[in-house]
Image (cartoon, grey):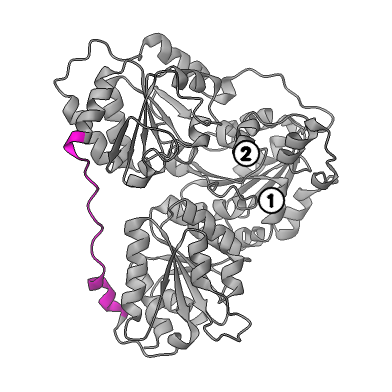
Amino acid sequence: MLVAEAVGRTLALLGCDTVFGVVGSGNFHATNAMVAEGARFVAARHEGGAATMADAYARTSGKVGVLSVHQGCGLTNAMTGITEAAKSRTPLVVLAAESTAARSNFAVDQEALARAVGAVAERVTSGATAVQDATRAVRRARDERRTVVLNLPLDVQAQLSGRLPEAALADLPPPPPPVQPRPQDVARLTDALVASRRPVLVAGRGARSPQARDRLLELAEATGALLATSAVAKGLFGASPWSLDVSGGFASPLAAELITASDLVVGWGCALNMWTMRHGRLIGPGATVAQVDVDPAALGAALPVRVGVVGDVAATAAAVTAALRGRFRPEPGWRSPQLKDRIAREARWRDVAYDDAGGDGRIDPRTFSIALDDLLPTERVVGVDSGNFMGYPSMFLSVPDEQGFCFTQAFQSVGLGLATAIGAALARPDRLPVAALGDGGALMGVSELETAVRLALPLVVVVYNDDAYGAEVHHFGPDGHPLDTVLFPETDIAAIGRGFGCDAVTVRTQDDLDGVRTWLAGPRDRPLLVDAKVTRGMPSWWLEEAFRGH
């Protein structure tokens, strides 16, 4: 068996059941070998889209994702999506053909490219080690939660493999056990919780699992804590009456008020960075900050912490809850009936009063988002692009749980949202997929509309269309700078969607949403594009916070 076939079959045998990519001569045989072993190949129209689909699929399914690309230009086309995945610690294997001939047009330093964006660089070095090399890439992606670029040189692909792919099943050890916290660290965190009267537990990416959620709910019940998440973990505590939803720039006024009033903030698998803590302004005077993470380097990286615990979120929460048993707490935190009622009435952005700014053929994005949220079925998975609009779908569209929200924003790249929703849709075919995009991002990633149509996805593509790069309009406009470079003529994105084979509606008022109702009631055998002509006279509430970090 040639190395190209052995590597492809090895990945499939190790559980990589779906591979995204664009096939060229260099990755043709390895990709076909994965398919022959039972993996599904999803052909994207651009490697950048394929990379983000693979990223979103891995995040939403909990499996190791696979991206397959051609040598040189195939990899460089995918680099933005790979960077997002690497920054998000997505378990992803990038199977990249590689030209090692110095005079080849395709020759670039692919190992340096991978390392430059925070990915792990691996290589299949010979026929004798091909199966072991592929197995190592999967293991590192799975166990270290890393994006691994597995370079597959063209000359090595043509060698004979020294082992059969089936050997990989014996080579891959089981996942390592959860990282257990040290007893002394558990004791310190327990003491902090016992001393606290207004604790808030903030969960992030490292808590996105049913086990972590359940253990944190138990701990919150034992301590009277309120619950919040970072944006990437939105929906994790959605069923709890003590959930404040998302902390940080997206936080509702009530959430920001209560988090700031806390005397103890504990981050669980959460960076507590400028987004989640509003550059530290959500930490009240005198409040204690604690942090739990499996990565020692993460502790205190964004904010000084008084109590740092290296440990798995679920394991640490369980250990602290056990340590709390028998500890006297004179009052149940701040979980009063009055506060519970206030959270029910005010914690969601849709419950915050506002003056509707719609008119002259444009709809207020808040009014549009609330109406859309009421129309769409509860079981949904929402993928969000980047831009001035992004807070509206992120906060006004509800999701059933943390698997219902896919937020590819670690690199803050515009244009990833459509591919995000496609990857998430394939991971959760039981849910209605929703892509929430700005007009800039929609047009950047528009080629993947054909992918969604070809796959017959029941995808709702929502474009918040202000005919501008709205973030720049509102950032630079108030200072009198010329805006010609970021304003565009009105674009009929609904017509573009129809050209790709989508159903489409244009929304200027709430009455125009009747077309969405009709599509939802129908066969849903093709995507629906909703071209929402939204107002552009005001910045979104989170924009000032966003530009503080630039």
**Residue type at tag 2:** Met
Q: Quadrant of residue 227?
A: top left
Verify whether residue 241 appears in magenta: no
Q: Name the residue under label 2.
A: 390
Q: Quadrant of residue 456?
A: bottom right
Q: Quadrant of the N terminus?
A: bottom left
Say if residue 455 shows up in the picture. no
Horizontal side, residue 33 vs residue 434: left or right:
left
Graded by Cα atoms within 10 Å as few (under 14), some (14 to 19) or many (20 or more), the crowding at tag 1 reads many
Q: Distance between the residues labelled 2 and 1?
A: 12 Å
Q: Nearer the viewer, residue 341 or 93?
A: 93
Give the vertical position of 247 relative to 82 (above or below). Answer: above
Span shown in magenta: 165-184
Q: Quadrant of the C terminus?
A: top right
Q: Nearer the viewer, residue 70 or 512?
A: 70
Residue ID at (44%, 18%): 285
Horizontal side, residue 496 vs residue 70: left or right:
right
Give the vertical position of 529 relative to 20 (above or below). Answer: above
Question: Picture coordinates of residue 59 (x, y %)?
Answer: 44, 51
Identify the element where label 2 is drawn: loop
**Which label sits on residue 442?**
1
Residue ID at (76%, 54%): 496
